[in-house]
Image (cartoon, coloured by chain):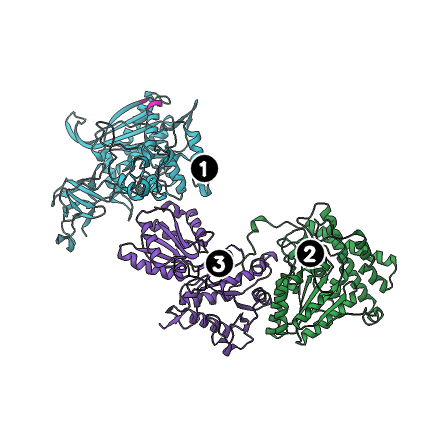
Amino acid sequence: MAKPVIMPKFGFTQETSVIVRWLAQPGQTVEQGDPIAEVSTDKVDMEVEAPASGILDGVRFQEGDEVPVTAIIAYIRQPDETLPPETLAAEEQPVAKATPPPPRPVFTPAGGVSPTRATPVAARVAADLGVDIAQVSGSGPGGRITRKDVETYAAQARPAAPSSPPPVSSSGKVRAAPAARRLARELGVDLSRVQGTGPRGRVQSVDVRAAAATPAPSPLPGVREVIPLTGMRKTIAQRMQASAQQAPHITFDADVDVSALEALRRRANAALPEGHPHVSLTALIAKACAWALQRHPRMNARLEDDSILLLADINIGIAVALDEGLIVPVVHDVNHKGVLEIAADIAAVVERARSGKLRGEDLQGGVFTISNLGMFRVDRFTAIINPPETGILAVGRVRKRFVPDENDQPVLRPMMTITLSADHRVVDGAIAARFLDDIRTALEHPDAMIL
Amino acid sequence: MRELTYAEALREALHQVMQEDASVFMIGEDIGVYGGAFGVSAGLIDEFGPERIIDTPISEAAITGACIGAALTGMRPVGEIQFMDFITLSMEQLVLQAAKIRFMFGGKAKVPFVLRTPAGSGTGAAAQHSESLENWFVHAPGLKVVMPSTPYDAKGLLRAAIYDDNPVIFVEHKLLYKTKGPVPAEPYKIPLGQSKVVREGSDLTIVATSIMVKRSLEAAEILAEEGIQVEIIDPRTLKPLDMAPIEASVQKTGRALVVHEAVKTGGFGGEVVARIVESEAFDYLEAPVRRLAGLDIPIPYNRTLEYHAVPQVETIVEEARKLVQGGY
Amino acid sequence: MMTITETPNYETYLQEWGREKALDLLRKMLLIRSFEEKAEELYALGRVHGTMHLSIGQEASAVGASLPLRPTDYLLNHHRGHGHCLAWWGSNVDLMMAEFLGKETGYCRGRGGSMHIANVESNNLGANGIVGGGIPIAAGVGLSIKLRKTDQVALVVFGDGATNEGAFHESLNMASIWDLPVIYYIENNQYAMSMPTKKAFNIERLSQRACAYGIPGVSVDGNDLFSVYETVQEAAERARAGQGPTLIEALTYRWRGHSKSDRQAYRTREEVKAWQKKDPIKRFAQKLGLDEATLAALQQEARERIEQAVAFAEASPEPDVSTIMEGVYA
């Protein structure tokens, strides 16, 4: 049966995407995993990959069409298959033609942690205080994070985390209905900037929604819109600044020949058990990193006060870009897991991240981070270390390049550039370089990991 | 389904209960051959005799005490205080005895009886025959307070009240006795402590009791013409009060209005407003929670003054409109 | 009808009942006296919460009134009712003392206290903190008996002051028109709180009020046990025979003030002393021909039993605060 290609949902408030460009044409044969379309959400452009190998057919939308997420946009069929009958009638209408999707309110969950791991009040207070709730340990039943936990953490964690000042008008307080206040908190809207249409100028919910939808006009010349730094964005800003300032970053590139890796990936995906998530490159890279971390304990370490703590477990964080910002869910115990299991874990935790259902442990215990921006066609990049880790691996895209073979003849090989950033307070260049080299070895010759 | 008046529905409930349970009897003034001041017990004495439909002298304290004593010793009396105004003469027995005996005796006794009483204004009976004192009894732990607004509710709630093991004050609005509504013929109970969503809507929550339910429904029809959809909730039992549907409703609509006949100051509305504001529904309020209730005056004799002393359909419409359109 | 009955012949009673049974009555009175004295003592030691209304000097009335009645009959009592509670069927002085001290093991789980002690199982429908509060309830009990067609009776005990409450009038009237089997028992100890009966009534004997309801009224020496016994018994027989209520006035005297905060400025020490000479317990012991030593021994027995009760009560737990909301609704 022909396999439908659906418009994926990339962020959990995303409702539609616009097809920017088809990368393959109807009738073209594609390989599973090949990018076949470029689509744009309101923040980033993403690629839609072929879910199977076969012939692209039954394309239902054109470039410029805005399509609801999870809608079917095309099919991959085998040469002897036909398309499902309903596709032959052009029925599914695009949502809108080439009009940009309406701007959505900025949603700032406190690290996307579900209510079972933190109380709603705790999540709200964490957002208000700019606290990364993932860092807070819970004292409630079952380790649930309570408001008090958040406040305690905020008080002792860093002095540079002020509570977001309440909007102050000339009388000292904003006149706003309770519903409006709640909505403003949830949407990250600054109440003092909202025009109230209620009696006596009271701000009502409808006013908050309007303010969230339209960019706040700014009195500053040359400034089109002012977005307050709150919630997740603020947390990221603070942590990245701290990391950049405190950890002297040394960076190392390696161009990796991933032919063997890709072949391994294809073999793994060809033999998948029913319903098992596909093995991505990231899963294999994680396995390689775990192997290398075992061989270089200094890279699996944390600097605390005057000591370097060598850590016991190998839990690897996989950076995920949500609409709202960067989040790094963690796969635990990678060194003890096979690639299939790692792939399943990654798929599961990324799904939880995207659907806002992350658990506390999903954001805790990471010792190393992998950030793969290959899907954005980045060739190479440098990542900032995720404190308090010692290293982070930035992964670029796979490109076919000509490289010399053993006979110095140019051959086309799939190449991928990986960049390691390491904290020079903990490790010197030599250790970092050897670590990176081991990763390369594992990627280019996966059997090294078991020999 | 056939329709009965509110009074007929009450009578039917009493009839059915007294047929099946010999421990139930009625006691009050003029309830026998006279049939009760509002006709509720008309004809019952012919079926059940003067032993079970007991006429008393004018002795409210004794009527109430008799209910208490009988209830303490295995019976389920249904007492009647002819006008709620006169319940003031039973206060000691109700508040200091009936309400407290179970608790004072360490939970080892029960006082199961119902005290029915006609209340409310609109009949020109003036200040001493038009009272709505239900909130006094909401304020006494150990008592339950019920105010049915329809014939259907009246029949089901009375049966439930009689079989409840606690003293229940059962308040019937005089102007409701002649109202008609569908009532199933078979016996049925409506559980005490269960609010009812009488009308659904998305713009405003009205919590109304007794006769104000009917008036709120009429107001809702008028408001619907203007595009305002009102949700109406009848608590039915004031104590214990079922807040869950009210909270859910206010969360939905963001605006709430409590309507009752009794005087606003110190009235039941204050209790409802406090509970709304104390609940999670607070976070969803777009406007202050308002009360529409009786003026702080004794009920006047003059017909027009009497009319304006309590909420009417048009005042409910006006208040609702104002709340929804940002007047508060 | 308002007659003061003659003192019965104790010899006859001794012969009919036997000495042991008579001694039991004395023991009961002594137990009541000891209970009250111990209550006073505990209060003075600061171990009792609230106040108390002691019935020292009224023991004969308490024991005599319940003596002719059955376990299936009902008692409704008043705030000065420790004696009546103790005299009633199935009473347990340990549980009474525990209630008095507010303990979980008390009759009312510590929630009622001195003025609200009840033993519903034994048809003791409770003491009442409201003067006259039990009087309308008694009519209700009488009505219930009548409707259920049993031969039970209800004894409601109250003081002289209660007869001036409106509810007294309503209840007696109701009982009289329906012939309810209620014994209205006034313990007239000459004072309401501080108001002497002389000033509160325009009539000589409170039993005169019976005529307002067309029912029999009797005044009796409340300090003579068998006088009380006979009067109540006659009233009970009438009631059981369907002849309706009776109003009994038992004349007695309380040795102590109204409550613990009473300075007794309204009476003289001489008056109190005079009445103490007419101690109902001593009188009964004399009538039985007991000597000082035997009486003393019985007194000691009673005191020891009360000590046991105190020990039980003090060893009992306080109610658990987490159960504070219990017992409001059935």
Depth-wise, is mark 1 or mark 2 nearer the camera?
2
Judging by the rendered image, the residue that carries numbered circle 1 is A148
Q: Amino acid at mark 2?
A: Met
**In the structure shown, which secondary structural element does the residue marked by tag 3 occupy?**
loop
Could you confirm whether marks 2 and 3 are on the same chain? no
Q: Give percent across and percent down for residue A415.
A: 21, 31
Chain letter behind tag 1: A
Looking at the image, residue A356 sits to the left or right of residue A214; the answer is: right
Looking at the image, residue A327 sits to the left or right of residue A146; the answer is: left
**In the structure shown, which secondary structural element does the residue marked by tag 2 occupy?**
helix
Which chain can be seen in purple?
B
- Residue C96: image tag: 2
Q: Residue at x 50, y 78 (%)?
A: B47
Work out which quarter of the rendered image holds the N terminus of chain B and state it: bottom left
Mark 2 nearby-residue class (10 Å; few <14, some 14–19, many ≥20): many
Q: CA distance from mark 2 to mark 3?
A: 38 Å
Depth-wise, is mark 1 or mark 3 nearer the camera?
3
Q: Judge whether B179 appears above or below A360 on screen.
A: below
Could you confirm whether marks 1 and 3 are on the same chain? no
Q: Give the extent of the magenta segment.
A: A244-249
Q: Judge whether A425 appears above or below A208 on screen.
A: above
Which chain can be seen in green?
C
Judging by the rendered image, the residue that carries numbered circle 3 is B133
Q: CA distance from mark 1 to mark 2?
A: 48 Å
Q: Amino acid at mark 3?
A: Leu
